[in-house]
Image: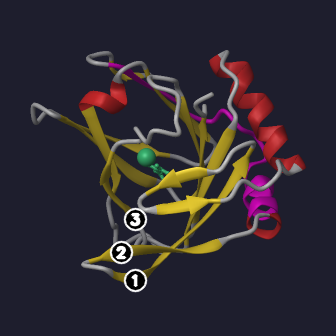
Amino acid sequence: MQLTDRNGSVIYFPQMLHLSQNYFNRLKTACCWQTEEVQVFGKWHKLRRQTAWYGTADYRYAGQIKTAQPWLPVLREIKTQVEALTQDSYSGVLLNYYPDGLAGMGWHADNERDLATNAAIASVSFGATRRFDLRHQDGETLSINLEDGSILIMAGEFQEYWKHQLPIQRKVKAPRINLTFRVMMG
Ligand SMILES: O=C(O)CCC(=O)C(=O)O
Ligand SMILES: [Mn+2]
């Protein structure tokens, strides 16, 4: 399902990965999760969200450096399926673990210098369904529920014109893991 094709495209594929409960458990156990921290007025704060970065190059984002860890078998398995669908090849994956709906991610675009410009980003979700919001710089907003086993592709100039967020949803009690497969510069 295509959500938009204005200034980049966003396409949603539900139920793309089978055995999603199994993937959730393997990722939860095998990945090297780190508590995410943000700097506000010079002071570091721990977030509820945990992250992990795998791939071939380090990734500088939100004032931090994520040191690349070598691909794990479970990540390669998922990557193969995502690449077959999207016909792209990815050099890194950022994982986010949200223990419940009180963890989220604020408005941002994935346009760091370390990422190849206008390359596709493929977002895979396991676990609790969470709402994902998109906002064009002219104010147009769209929302979609990202379900267990789904893949969302953001491509073209999308990151230049749109921001996205994963809002806090107090009613969501279950955990979720998201993987964003990315193409690094160079
Ligand atoms: O968890 C999500 O669905 C969004 C994650 C995201 O936007 C990111 O990692 O940049
Ligand atoms: Mn993002």
Give the magenta-colored segment's residue range.
8-27
In this rendering, the label closer to the viewer, 1 or 2:
2
Name the residue: 81% across, 56% down.
22
In this rendering, the answer to whether 87 lies above or below 81 is above
Q: Name the residue under label 3.
A: 104
Q: Which residue is drawn at 40% across and 65% down?
A: 104
For marks 1 and 2, the one nearer the N-term is 2
Check the image and report above or below for 30 versus 15: below
Nearest to N terminus: mark 3 or mark 2: 2
Q: Where is residue 159 in the image (x, y as percent from the top left)?
A: 35, 32
Q: Name the residue under label 1.
A: 45
Residue 39: which disc?
2
- Mark 1 and 2 residues: CB-CB less than 8 Å, in contact? yes
Residue 21 magenta = yes
Q: Where is residue 103 in the image (x, y as percent from the top left)?
A: 43, 71
Q: How crowded is mark 2: few (under 14 residues within 10 Å), some or many (20 or more)?
A: few
Q: Where is residue 173 in the image (x, y as percent from the top left)?
A: 48, 75
Residue at figure coordinates x 36%, y 75% from the top left: 39
140 relative to 79 in the view: left or right:
left
Q: Hey, what amino acid is under mark 1?
A: His
- What is the three-letter code of the residue carrying label 2? Gln
Quadrant where the C terminus sits is: top right
Helix, strand or loop for disc 2? strand
Q: Which of marks 3 and 2 is in front?
A: 2
Mark 3, Cα crowd under 10 Å, few <14 / some 14-19 / many 20+, is: many
Quadrant in which residue 185 is drawn: top right
Q: For the residues marked 3 and 1, what is the alpha-carbon distance in whole angstroms?
A: 15 Å
First in sequence, mark 3 or 1: give its number.
1
Q: In which quarter of the image is the N terminus?
A: top left
